[in-house]
Amino acid sequence: MTRSAAARYDFRLRRISFAGLIVLCAAAWAALALRAMHRSAWEDRAGAAWKQRADAAEEKIDPNTAPAASLRRLPGIGAELAARIVDFRSEGKRPFGAAKDLAQVRGIAEAKVERIDPYLDLPASTK
């Protein structure tokens, strides 16, 4: 006696297999939810840190005379870039007359110059 095609392939899940599938889906959903919450919290902390540094740099900073500690308050300028700016000045090179002149310092690109330009106090005659 031959069985029908439908009877040959029985794809019904047993109760234990179905429960395992539900647990696996729930664990995957929970992992994705935790990852999303962690990423959101990290972005909030990073955004708050940048805003705090930008607020601290509301007074204008002259890159020709400011010490490294003051330069670090500029958005995107850390300890290493601040030290490079000070070193660039101390090498006797011409002073920064415009914001774009900061791009001569290794590690400072045009995008960073545009970001810090509103916080710079440069000579009015060349800005």
Image (cartoon, rainbow, N blue to C red):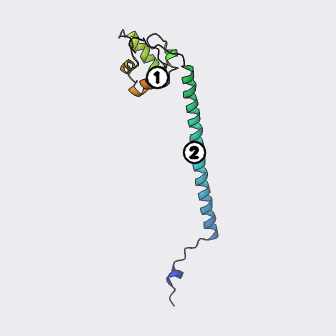
Q: Tell me where residue 16 appears, x and y as whole percent.
A: 63, 67
Q: Quadrant of residue 105?
A: top left
Q: Tell me where residue 110 appears, x and y as whole percent.
A: 39, 26
Q: Which mark is residue 116?
A: 1
Amino acid at circle 1: Ile
Q: Which mark is residue 73?
A: none
Q: Left of 20 or right of it: where is 95?
A: left
Q: Which of label 2 and label 1 is nearer to you?
A: 1
User: Could you tell me which residue is drawn at 57 percent across and 49 percent down?
Assistant: 32
Q: Secondary structure at mark 2?
A: helix
Within 10 angstroms of label 1, few (less than 14), some, or many (20 or more) residues? some
Q: Quadrant of residue 88?
A: top left
Q: Secondary structure at mark 1?
A: helix
Amino acid at circle 2: Ala
Within 10 angstroms of label 2, few (less than 14), some, or many (20 or more) residues? few
Question: Split into 4 quadrants, where in the image is the C terminus?
Answer: top left
Q: Which mark is residue 36?
A: 2
Residue, far front: 125
